[in-house]
Image: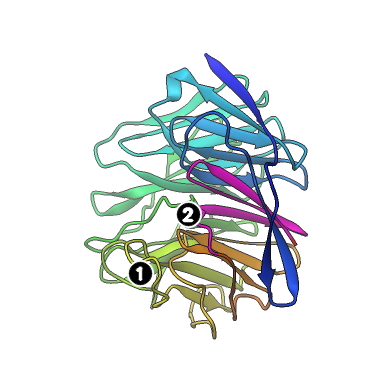
Amino acid sequence: MKYVILFTILSTLVISCSDDSILLNPINEIGHSSSLRGLYTVNEKVTWASGSNGVVKRTINNETWESFQDTTMLHLDFRDIHAFSKDEAIVMSSGDGCEMYKTKDGAQTWKLVYNNKTEGIFFDGMDFWDDKSGLAFSDPINGKLFIIKTTNGGDSWKKLNNLPTVLAGEASFAASGTTINCVGDSTVYIGTGGGELSRMFISKNRGKTWSVVNTKMRTGEASGIYSLAFLDEQNGILVGGNYLDSNNTENNCMLTIDGGNSWTFPETPPNGYRSCITFNANGNLIACGRTGIDLSEDGGLNWKSISKNGYYACSLQEGFAWVVGKNKIAKLEF
């Protein structure tokens, strides 16, 4: 059984940001309780979100939201979602095992396209190069990242043959489904942490072979790379830090201009631990986390706080952004 609930904009808050005004529009969260961590914007009208308790949300007019909750999926935490249109999307669950479902009719019906109950499986994220080809990955199994691929838009998946080896304690984070980034035609980046090193795994041929690069992102328990975004195959940005020390800015952001081979720190980092980063066509970036939202207008070199409200995931377009968190959605208008 499915329930559908419409959401409306509740109010508008004006947040001072240097000489600009940014409007933060909270959404009236009537309906199902959910910790929203999955977010994907298809175009200027269509955005999908997903979260705990099997909840999926969608806007097709960039204003009001519909909420879908299938009673057979209440036990699932959909940490990531990827959408192809207003009707077609795929969701990925994280936790003890992984289930992935796809809809082709605007969330009216869902088909199970992947199911893995292997002990130790905990999926962290997925991404696509195009409407057909993509990857999804889990924390390590037997000392190797567990990575699956699709070539038919997520209708079916199979495990990669060549899986990269990890260090003791090394894994990834399912904070927003954005520790994996498919870039260009064949390049993919995966960020890790949790151990003695926070590293970038890089493949230039859709996962056939892998290289790994050490970064100086924060290390240790609950520390590392939580999200990454590549503007192109050369220029990328990492954010993260320590989830348990959310106000600390220590080694919470790094930049590359050479495809991830080397990394440098920004001049002014984001204001604490950040679980998601995203950019728009103009090269502006926002990052969000438990302690607020930050904006960069110079490619990630300098960051300024635009909100102290905590959110888990963000999606930035020209002139606006969506942010989601625990029982809440908000729209930023620039």
| Closer to viewer: mark 2 or mark 1 | 1
* Residue 204 appears anywhere in the view: no
Quarter occupied by residue 290: bottom left
Give how far apart the Cα atoms at labels 2 and 1 are. Answer: 20 Å
Q: Position of residue 326 (x, y in %)?
A: 47, 45
User: What secondary structure do most residues of the magenta stretch adopt?
Assistant: strand
Q: Position of residue 280 (x, y in %)?
A: 71, 62
Mark number, residue 57: none
What amino acid is found at the position of numbered circle 1 in the picture?
A: Ser
- The answer to whether 306 is drawn above or below residue 102 in the figure is below
Residue 53 lies, in percent from the top left, at 43, 31
Question: How many discs appear?
Answer: 2
- Please give the residue where the numbered disc 2 appears in the rendered image: 207
Is residue 95 placed above or below 266 in the rendered structure?
A: above
Query: First in sequence: mark 2 or mark 1?
Result: 1
User: From the viewer's perspective, is residue 128 above or below residue 165?
Assistant: above
204 lies left or right of 106? left
Secondary structure under tag 1 reads strand
Question: In the figure, is residue 241 to the left or right of 253?
Answer: left
Asked if the stretch drawn in magenta spans residue 326, the answer is: yes
* Front-most of residues 58 and 84: 58
Q: Verify CB contact (< 8 Å) between mark 2 and mark 1.
A: no
Q: Which residues are magenta?
A: 308-333
Question: Which kind of residue does numbered mark 2 sit on?
Answer: Gly
Where, quadrant-wise, is the C terminus in this rendering? bottom right
* Residue situated in front as seen by the camera: 300 or 158: 300
- At horizontal 47% and vertical 33% (from top left) the residue drawn is 33
| Residue at image coords 33%, 50% | 139
Q: Residue under circle 1?
A: 198
Q: Quadrant of residue 7 in the image?
A: top right
Q: State the residue at coordinates (31%, 31%).
A: 117
